[in-house]
């Protein structure tokens, strides 16, 4: 058995609130965190790499993955299909590694309600204001005006799910939000049920007691 039980860190937010930025920073801080690369039918944005940012798939290919049970969860977001492949998550759990998911509320709900629900730690990221959210989407410079308008229109619905999450943080100052994210992860890793090696460790302490008698 691995010394620790890996957890599933789910991060959701309205588009543009900063979850990709914060996820990347968290992985730089701790490179042992494994990112769940989702499959999507969305077209790649400039600079996005197949197999690293997403597995870019046709609708047919995606639907086949769902039909063969390869997806832990899947959902339609902004008119495209997105889903988290199951096999890498199972491998990460077996290795005692944490998996980070950047997924929407529908995916979060499906994983929370699955057999892996007890391993989930979920975090919702709020923008400091709606005008700042729009400014960030525009400033990212990767989506057309129509796509940005579509994302803004959906952001209120995404935000309405904030209370389903274990933790909520407001991404105003990036450094502070990153610090808060690290704090959450560090504390969650210390939970007794995520440290199966403790039983053996305490047994060793007791053996030492006995040897002193
Ligand atoms: P999401 O993954 O939630 O769609 P991104 O991480 O792509 O959002 O962030 C959207 C834009 O906002 C990016 O250009 C990013 O650099 C910027 N951004 C993220 N967090 C902050 C912050 N705290 N302050 C200012 N800009 C930010
Ligand atoms: P984007 O197109 O900006 O990369 O992502 C759009 C939305 O889809 C974001 O809210 C993102 O979190 C969500 N998303 C990305 N991958 C998945 C996934 O595998 N499953 C679900 N349910 N949502 C996803």
Image (cartoon, helix red, strand yellow):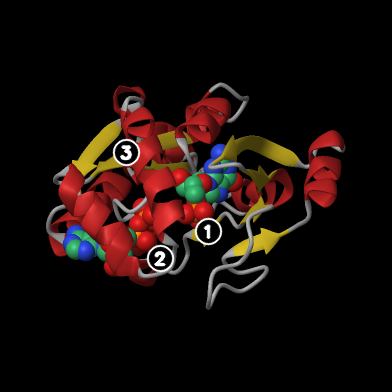
Q: Residue at x 19, y 43 (%)?
A: 130
Q: Does residue 33 appear left or right of residue 1 in this picture?
A: left
Q: Are marks 2 and 1 in contact (CB under 8 Å)?
A: yes
List x then y, in percent, for residue 182: 26, 55
Q: Earlier in the sequence, mark 3 or mark 2?
A: 2
Disc 2 target residue:
27
Q: Residue at x 38, y 59 (%)?
A: 23
List x then y, in percent, for residue 83: 65, 44
List x then y, in percent, for residue 35: 53, 58
Q: In the rendered image, which quarter is residue 63 located in?
A: top right
Q: Earlier in the sequence, mark 2 or mark 1?
A: 2
Q: Is residue 61 visible?
A: yes
Depicted 162 relative to depicted 64: above or below: above
Q: Nearer the viewer, residue 6 or 11?
A: 11
Q: Quadrant of the C terminus?
A: top left
Report helix, strand or loop for mark 2.
Answer: helix
Q: Residues within 10 Å of mark 2 (few under 14, many from 20)?
A: some
Mark 3 or 1: in front is 3
Disc 1 target residue:
35
Disc 3 target residue:
124
Q: Are marks 3 and 1 in contact (CB under 8 Å)?
A: no
Q: Quadrant of ligand 1?
A: bottom left
């Amino acid at each position: 058995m691995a010394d620790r039980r890996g957890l599933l860190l789910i991060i959701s937010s309205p588009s543009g609130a900063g979850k990709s930025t914060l996820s990347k920073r968290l992985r730089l801080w701790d490179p042992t965190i494994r990112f769940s690369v989702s499959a999507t039918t969305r077209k790649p944005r400039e600079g996005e790499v197949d197999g690293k940012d997403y597995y870019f798939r046709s609708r047919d290919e995606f639907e086949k993955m769902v039909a063969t049970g390869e997806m832990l969860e899947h959902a339609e977001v902004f008119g495209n299909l997105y889903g988290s492949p199951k096999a890498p998550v199972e491998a990460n759990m077996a290795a005692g590694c944490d998996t980070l998911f950047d997924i929407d509320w529908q995916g979060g709900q499906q994983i929370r309600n699955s057999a892996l629900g007890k391993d989930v730690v979920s975090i919702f990221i709020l923008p400091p204001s709606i005008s700042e959210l729009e400014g960030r989407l525009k400033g990212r410079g990767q989506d057309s005006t129509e796509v940005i308008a579509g994302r803004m229109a959906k952001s209120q619905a995404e935000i309405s799910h904030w209370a389903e999450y274990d933790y909520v943080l407001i991404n105003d100052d990036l450094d502070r939000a990153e610090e808060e994210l690290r704090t959450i992860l560090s504390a969650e890793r210390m939970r007794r049920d995520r440290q199966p090696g403790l039983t053996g460790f305490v047994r060793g302490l007791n053996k030492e007691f006995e040897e002193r008698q």
